[in-house]
Amino acid sequence: MASSTPFLAGADASPVRSGDLVVAVEHVSVSFPSPVGTGEVVRDVSFSINAGERVGLVGESGSGKSLTARAMMRLIPKPGRMSQGRILLDGVELGTGPTADPGTWRGTAMAMITQDPLSSLNPLVRIGVQVTEMLHRHRSLGRREARARAVELLASVGIPDPQRTLSYFPAVLSGGMRQRVALAIAISCNPRLLIADEPTTSLDVTIQAQVLDLLERMTAQHGTGVLLISHDLGVVADFCDRLLVMYGGRIVESGPTFEVIDHPAHPYTRALMASVPSMTGRLPDRLASIPGSPPIGGVWSKGCSFAPRCPIARPVCRDEDPLLVTQDQGDHAAACHATGDTQWRALIDGLGAS
Amino acid sequence: MNKEPAVTAPGKGTAATYAGAGRDHFAPIVDVRDLEVHFRSRRALRAVQTVKAVDGVSFTIAAGETLGLAGESGSGKSTIARTLVRINRPTAGSVTVAGEDTTRMRRDDLRRYRRRMQMVYQDPYDSLDPRMTVLEAIGEGLSVRGVTRASHRRDTERLLDRVKLPASLVSRYPHQLSGGQRQRVSIARALAVSPEVIICDEAVAALDVSIRAQVLNVLKDIQDDLKVSYLFISHDLSTLRFIADRVAIMYAGRLVEYGTSSQVFGDSRHPYTKALIAAVPTIGGRGGGPRIGLSGEPPDPARLPSGCAFHPRCPLAQDICRADRPALRQKQGGQMAACHMAPDAPAGEASV
């Protein structure tokens, strides 16, 4: 497998077949040196994404979702490091052989957009230069060709006057427009996987809808796999085929979106859904809230990290960390001791159903 | 809880009160009429531009009531908040709070007035001094109210209890608190001066979902106990649906829809409100189909479109919308809306 490295030649050279495995994250942990606790902020995370698949990673701040993405991009801020596991892109382990230099795949085979495009766009450089930079470097297009392609790209992400926009500085554009530019740059080299870390969090709802639609369209065209990271269960449930729920640095539930939403198997997922006020139907007088606060990354208590906040926790939860095990349906998994106990498990459905 | 106060005053047409006229049968704590806040921007070598950030907005808030204010960024929501606490000066119109006109207030009057109206911001770091402990921050507010130093600790602990925080936090600094705790401390700090109105400007927007629910519950409990009024500004409609008795939707500096929470969310009349509601991603799923209800972006407040400011994005726009700006009028269903295409309520119909 490692002998052929299709992504190094760019997606143009590798016809995309839907369902092909694009990325596999295997037992990845991320650690920071810490005087207390283990300092492990991402713990033994595994998942995979196929071509054209849209996977959502949902969790609260400190759950480790952004660091998982950064581990995939090999962009973990110092002094943190990936302390365990490996990441395979098109079957090649990142950091080995031809992928030793991240420049060969970062931004081309695997690209990322972030919450605030101002942090990925250079404020002092005109949009045109920033969009064409990738095309020069990785597609070896000439000046004029790159410019023409940049205009096409900006037009395809719905920027009204692409020709003129090329001469603008990022600050001139609205948040929605900046995110479109970031998306145009991210897809300019037809990546195999696009990581979108809270891409719509700072946008208004109507603009958020536009950007999500665009993301859906642009990635479907090229069969790009998407990892959408968000704290907003609504956004993720709306956009993704499959969900990964993170808590305390671990994946605590994973499965097809409809399965996870209709039959949440982890009390955290269930409680998270109940704490969002709905837009239809009768509203409760009080919202079902989860008591306490999320744990601080790297300082985990013994046992299940959700146990201190879990309304149905039993003594075993405080002693043993549950494994992520498959539920009755094949690809739905949860890390909860209640899983094996029908009566105990039934309590999960009762959470938040006040 | 006193749901939908004032609006449901039996037998009274509420259209008049909505519009700000005929308010003799109930006294709102906040009465904003025809408020205009214009900014003049001067840029070198360019003509002076007037930006109408808020352009003719009227609303009322009753004691113990929550008015939700929604709209996209740049719609003027925060300018209204800042004008209410007189950080910005109104260009025209009046803001009356508990019977006092605040528009012409000077220093001492303003200082007194600001005790009645407090603000809680999105980022608690904006309102909490990082070098002050919780006790010092809340104590500052208590001193303003004339509480003696000796009682600060007791009163602070009492306020912390109101926002469901343990008394042990009194000696902590802001950086030693979690985001949710910090926001609750800034709510406690606002409560320290016993205000009648608290403006929550995106107060829960930065909090994690599970923490957001806790803070919303705390805000509701405080209102039930103290009958404080909230102006709750949020871009998150589901939060507003939960917390607000009445809701005002803003677009480009003007109210486009205004009514009870159930009128606005359950039976909206303005196409912009409908689009906003449709754009909220829901956990239940959309059942396929495109997400977009609305193309384009909100207009540049310095260059508003002619007629109805929403017409370039509106799926229903006709010629009249490009020419005439629609007034905020009572529509079928009872709420007020500013849209030529929404049928008016029949004359004399009592509102719902």
Image (cartoon, rainbow, N blue to C red):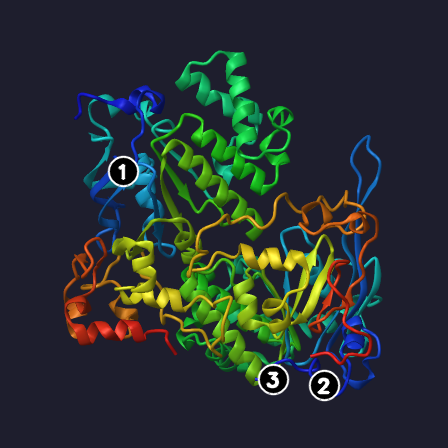
- Asked whether residue A160 appears in the rendered view, the answer is yes
Q: Residues within 10 Å of mark 3 (few under 14, many from 20)?
A: few
B196 and A273: which is toward the camera: A273
* A55 relative position to A147: left or right: left
| Residue B306, placed above or below residue A149 | below
- The dot on residue B9 is 2
Residue at image mark 1: A19
| Residue B321, placed above or below residue A275 | above
B266 and B220: which is toward the camera: B266
Q: Residue B62 falls in which quadrant of the image?
A: bottom right
- Asked whether residue B235 appears in the rendered view, the answer is no
Three-letter residue code for mark 3: Asn
C-alpha span from label 3 to label 2: 12 Å
Q: Are marks 1 and 2 in contact (CB under 8 Å)?
A: no
Chain bearing tag 2 is B
B231 and A110: which is toward the camera: A110
Extreme residue toward the bottom, this view: B10
Residue at image mark 3: B2
Query: Measured from the top left, where is residue A11 in percent x and y?
Result: 34, 25
